[in-house]
Amino acid sequence: MQLTTTIHTDELVKQCLQGHTKAYSELYQRYCKAMFSTCYRIVNHFAEAEDVLQDSFMDAFNNLKTFSYESTFGGWLKTIVINKSINHLRKKKLDLVDIDKVVTEHLTHEYDINEEEIIYKIEEVKAAIQQLPDGYRTVLSLYLLEGYDHEEIAEIMHVATSTTRTQYMRAKQKLLQILAK
């Protein structure tokens, strides 16, 4: 009878650094679903999310020696995945509008939609989020679904904090418009 134990992630990282291929496979299996979800929420295209995920794991595995155990492996990997996803969108010409370059008067309540009157269903919200432009969807996903604050999002995306706040506000408005239809 063989006893199986769950190997701690830190031990798997050490085994990877020693060249054990099964450890790489185990790390991939542990994190691939969650990281794919993160990629897909940002990239919004299944095949492209798969590509970004594979690139992210390759970067993580190639740079494993730089993992310093200051955070969890999952947190470190998620940062790589998010940065890769955003870079992928940048290559596709992600449009973010800097608030300093925009007249903000038109941002006031253009649409009188009462959020409490709309009954949300999970699948409808997911579908509506997928319809958002890349910039809106990215900021909304990072803020609402991934739990980053605006300062962190601004740092990740290399934009001003005011830009992420504006994108988030616009994303919510657009999302409410889509859901109201």
Image: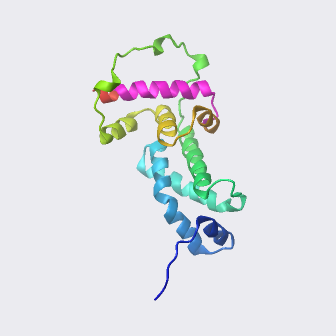
Q: Main secondary structure of the magenta part?
A: helix
Question: From which residue to which does the magenta span run?
Answer: 157-177
- Check if residue 175 falls in the magenta segment: yes
**Which quarter of the figure is the C terminus placed in?**
top left
Residue at image x 47%, y 53%? 36
Q: Is residue 79 shown above or below 152?
A: below
Residue 180, given in percent of the width and then of the height, sits at 29, 26
- Check if residue 39 falls in the magenta segment: no
Residue at image x 59%, y 36%? 153
Residue at image x 58%, y 71%? 23
Residue situated furthest top in the rendering = 105
Q: Give the tally of numbered discs.
A: 0
Residue at image x 69%, y 54%? 70
Q: Quadrant of residue 148?
A: top right
Residue 168, given in percent of the width and then of the height, sits at 49, 28
Residue 28, given in percent of the width and then of the height, sits at 53, 64
Residue situated furthest bottom in the rendering = 1
Q: Nearer the viewer, residue 48 or 69?
A: 69
Q: Is residue 71 shown above or below 126?
A: below
